[in-house]
Image: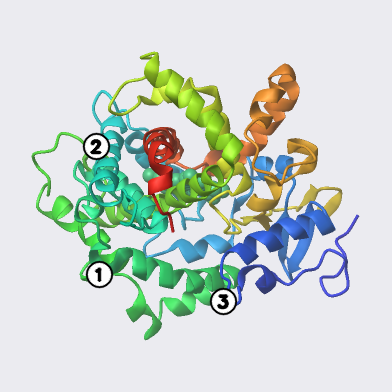
Amino acid sequence: MALPSHRTGSLHRPLLQFLLPPPSHPRPRTRKNMIATAAKYGPLVRIGPNDLLCTDPETLRRMSSVRSAYTKGVFYETGRIIPGYNNIVCERDEEKHKALRTKMAGAYNGRENGSTGFEESIDRQMLNLVALIESKYVSSPGNLRPFDLCAKTHFFSLDVISDASFGKAFGFLVEDRDLHQFVEINDSALPAMNFLQAVPSLTNIVYRWPFNLALPRDVDGVGFGRLMGYVVPLVRLGGLFADSPVGWQRVAWRSGFDLMQSQGGICSSVAGSITTAAAIRHTLLALISTPSVYATLQKEIDESVSSGRVSRPVIRDVEAQALPYLQAMIREGYRTWPSVVGLGSKQVPKGGDSICGFHVPEGTQVSHNYSGVMRLKEVFGEDADVFRPERWLEEEADAERLKLMNSVLELAFGNGKYQCLGKRIALMELNKIFFEVGVRLMCQLKNLYLC
Ligand code: HEM
């Protein structure tokens, strides 16, 4: 079957409709559109002259599998931060991407970060977050102390990533302020990023004068560029944090990373920390606003603490993995609200392909509908739109169904040759934060005001 014309065919929906939010109501609309589009038009929808939106798990998995002939699509051009230099995200040449990935994988798997990998970095920042809440944000009657969940979760994930990268955190949590206006600048740049991702052909213009003046540079005093600047002395002067034995940047540098590669690495990590903060935020919000889930998790946490089954002051990752309800709640969090909404399109290889019964010509850009795939009723059940962690436990009786749900959920981190390199560290952060902050919020929710 051939794809109908993008002008007349039922597969058509304009690309910009997904990604250009009205100014008053930004990101949720993108997600809603993607979910609604899959529900209305099915697993393959034409959203632009050469662009398809795919919600078929099997196709999404196959395109990124290690032996797939698909390549990263034009969309990834928008991930270039330093003009003329391709980082792991925007590198579309398969061989170069593989080489870069091999170099980075050792550093990202955490094993070279000392015997406990990233865990100590996360624990340190976990304690900093708890100390911040306890010292400044516990309200009492007549003394309301608002806690900005958006900003503080971002501070936490940025400090984790810098601690794991350099052996020393940027210091957002300790100072409790938006250092170098990073969060402010990042948030205000996101709509423009969204626009570019919808029209990636405009990306090249951004790298030309005068637009390139707005790109972050390591000499900047603020924003992304300021964070990139942390890497410069590390590489040029032989180690900014010479007293620290850990830090994957140190590992990467030893394995031959140059300045550009190190800066590219820190950019991907900082981007990953934004994604992790989004996952934390949504799940905490869902948890706090679903009393039955809240109570069940609290019971599991209380029992595990009182029986002495978990380490204090911070739960070990392996202990968190053994708490069934916590795990179900985390899965349900990033299922109902997968942090990545970008199209992540892959390019159909030579000779074309057959997708969902349609012939798709070579060069076509096939995008991921991350939000749509996580709401598939045939996978997650009729109540797929509901935040209900129990679905991950009920299915224990039905191993096949659970296997299917897990395999689809995994797509939230991509697959195969493009799979998220930060998956392990991100999941470790989630495992700890809902337990540690969760246990304290549960004790003190009445006294806390979350905005
Ligand atoms: C909940 C948190 C996170 C989610 C849901 C997530 C998800 C993803 C997804 C969907 C991709 C793209 C896969 C593709 O292109 O097909 C990706 C790529 C990537 N992520 Fe993450 N990510 C998270 C956190 C992180 C963190 C914390 C880091 C860094 C420490 C990180 C580093 C990367 C890198 C380097 C890539 C590029 C991989 C490549 O192109 O080979 N991510 N991530």
Q: How is the image coloured?
A: rainbow
> Label 1 sits on what residue type?
Val
120 relative to 208, above or below: above
> Label 2 sits on what residue type?
Arg
In front: label 3 or label 1: 3
Q: Residues within 10 Å of mark 3 (few under 14, many from 20)?
A: few
The residue lying toward the viewer, choosing from 217 and 281, is 281
Q: Residues within 10 Å of mark 2 (few under 14, many from 20)?
A: some
Residue, far right: 1
Q: Can you identify the residue that label 1 sits on? A: 222
Between marks 1 and 2, how big is the CA–CA gap? 25 Å
Residue 378 appears in which quarter of the rendering?
A: top right
Q: Residues within 10 Å of mark 1 (few under 14, many from 20)?
A: some
Q: Can you identify the residue that label 3 sits on? A: 24
Q: Are marks 2 and 3 in contact (CB under 8 Å)?
A: no
Residue 439 appears in which quarter of the rendering?
A: top left
Q: Position of residue 306 (x, y in %)?
A: 38, 17
Q: Can you identify the residue that label 2 sits on? A: 124
Q: Position of residue 386 (x, y in %)?
A: 69, 44
Q: Is mark 2 within 8 Å of ligand 1?
A: no
In front: label 1 or label 2: 2
Q: Residue at x 20, y 69 (%)?
A: 219
The residue lying toward the viewer, choosing from 398 and 200, is 398
Between marks 3 and 1, how big is the CA–CA gap? 26 Å
